[in-house]
Amino acid sequence: MKVLNTYQNELVSHYLHLMRNKLGISIINVSKDSPKEDENDLALISEFMRPMKYSQLVHTLTWCQCGQIDAKDKQVSLREGFVVRDDFDIWFTHYQQRVGKSRIG
């Protein structure tokens, strides 16, 4: 059981690393004891994935467009693909706040 718990922790850690890269966010605190940061980033990722799924967006294209987002912009073209644009707007506000905190340290 201990091995499975280790695997799950490694899986989540790797998933977070990949998704942070896709979203262009960096780790705020490099320490291994940053569960709050991980929890918040997982929530941010889910907050993006739910409306993406609901809008039936093509993942490859959407992630490619996501890589072109400038968090300083007030509006991004990626928004147009979402059926419920209010959900995207809420996510984008949270994304901008998170990117504003990002720094490698």
Image (tube, helix red, strand yellow):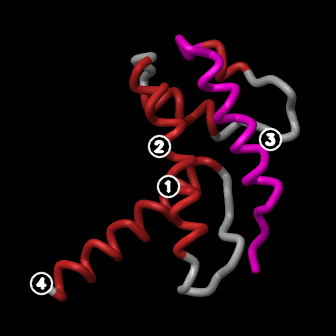
Q: Is residue 96 magenta?
A: yes
Asked whether the residues under the numbered discs 3 and 4 touch, taking CB atoms below 8 Å apart as contact, a structural biologist would say no
Q: Which residue does the numbered mark 3 point to in the structure image?
A: 71
Q: Which residue does the numbered mark 2 point to in the structure image?
A: 46
In the image, residue 58 above or below residue 34: above
- Badge count: 4
In the image, residue 80 above or below residue 62: above
Seen as rendered, the residue at the extreme left is 1
Asked whether the residues under the numbered discs 1 and 2 touch, taking CB atoms below 8 Å apart as contact, a structural biologist would say yes
Q: Position of residue 73 (x, y in %)?
A: 86, 32
Left or right of 17 on screen, residue 30: right
User: What amino acid is found at the position of numbered circle 1 in the picture?
Assistant: Leu
Seen as rendered, the residue at the extreme front is 36
User: What amino acid is found at the position of numbered circle 3 in the picture?
Assistant: Ala
Left or right of 96 on screen, residue 16: left
Segment colored magenta:
81-105
Q: Please, what secondary structure does the residue beneath circle 3 have? A: loop
User: What amino acid is found at the position of numbered circle 4 in the picture?
Assistant: Met
Q: Earlier in the sequence, mark 4 or mark 1?
A: 4
Question: Which quadrant holds residue 84?
Answer: top right
Asked whether the residues under the numbered discs 1 and 3 touch, taking CB atoms below 8 Å apart as contact, a structural biologist would say no
In the image, residue 16 above or below residue 1: above
Q: Could you say which disc has been placed on residue 1 in the image?
A: 4
- For this rendering, which residue is in front, 90 or 83? 90
Q: Which residue does the numbered mark 1 point to in the structure image?
A: 42
Front disc: 2 or 3: 2
Q: Earlier in the sequence, mark 3 or mark 4?
A: 4
Residue at the (65%, 23%) spot, across then down: 78
Tell me the distance, in whole angstroms, between the alpha carbons under discs 2 and 3.
18 Å
